[in-house]
Image (cartoon, rainbow, N blue to C red):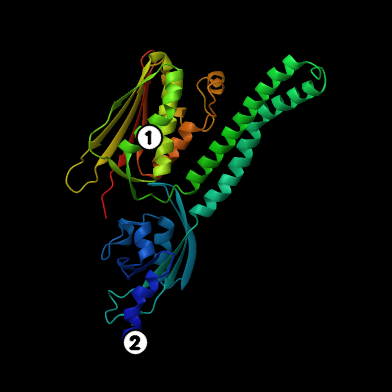
Amino acid sequence: MELSQAALLPEVLDALSDPVILVDGRKVVTFGNAAAMASWPALVKGAPLSFTLRAPDLIDAIDRVLASVAPMIRGTMTERLPVDRLFDFQVVSLSSALSASPRTAPAVVLVFRDLTEAKRLEAMRVDFVANASHELRTPLASLLGFIETLQGPARNDPLAQSRFLGIMREQGRRMARLIDDLLSLSRVEMSEHRRPVDPVDMAVVIRQVADTLRPVAEERQVALEFHLPPEPVLVAGDRDELMRVAENLIENAIKYGHSGGRVELTLTKEALGQGKCGEGHLIVRDFGTGISAEHLPRLTERFYRVDASASRETGGTGLGLAIVKHIVNRHRGRLTIESELGTGSVFHVILPLFLGE
């Protein structure tokens, strides 16, 4: 390869949308293109690849190519942290002519294709069909039953017609909420491997959501108490998704903790020491009846309800906390829940602060 062509190689590889990594005969990283650095920020030139990618199948494929067992090997690798990701990889042998020093020359090129989104899309399709068919069956059966009654025994009964039509309207609204929540959850899950990076002021988000939910709080005679810092609390995130987190948590606190008469909304900014990203900490506390300990581990599961009848009476779909969990995961944050019967519940959302440009 001529010098001018070699000099252009980094630019050519950076232009590719798929991650590409070059390693030498010792499996030390000699180059990673822009897509690779975006996928694995901890990747360091001059460090062993295994420091960043702990994938036995990938390392084994590299060893086999280096040993000239095969000039090219394909495979797949799965990552569990910080979120589940699936990659197709291709390991290809390179000529030592790329460098004057065979010991440090790029010996293998690794080309990856991120299959995470395709896998999530397929899972989303399957889950949506299964969940929608299951959860919509009851309200649809109710609607059909009332329609048959209105066409038959209640055909000439104005009072029954008015009452049944009101029930049918609520069942229709319930189905609309359910479909909206299913679609929201599916969208978040599909993009969970892509971390949002825009600055979002959580103090503004909380106030805006609280203003929107104030009529709900007043209807249930619940006072909203704010403990927010005077300065902005900028986190790295997606504003619409973080508003959804605040909306679900605050609305749940109002609806299920209204017996306590108040809901506390606390936001703090916490430093983690030199060289570490600080955190924004949102706390939503109600003083209602609380939740038994055995229910806490399952609260973020799809359609899990502590009290199914109470959830349906308040318009719940059983998906709110699942949506919150996946949004928080996408933001590389943490969600914890504390509750005790008779004292209320506390929901903690901890998100990394925005570091700036």
Residue bearing the label numbered 1? 208
Which three-letter amino acid code belongs to the residue tagged 1?
Gln
* Screen quadrant of the N terminus: bottom left
List the single residue furthest toward the bottom.
2
* Screen quadrant of the C terminus: bottom left
Residue at 31% in and 59% down: 43
Assign a secondary structure to mark 1: helix
Residue at 42% in and 14% down: 259
Residue bearing the label numbered 2? 2
Percent position of residue 27, x then y: 33, 66
Percent position of residue 327, x then y: 42, 41
Crowding near pointer 2: few (<14 within 10 Å), some, many (20+)? Answer: few
Percent position of residue 83, x then y: 41, 46
List the single residue furthest toward the left.
274
Q: Is residue 154 above or below residue 194?
A: above
Viewer-side residue, 187 vs 225 = 225
Crowding near pointer 1: few (<14 within 10 Å), some, many (20+)? Answer: some
Q: Is residue 257 above or below residue 211?
A: above
Which three-letter amino acid code belongs to the residue tagged 2?
Glu
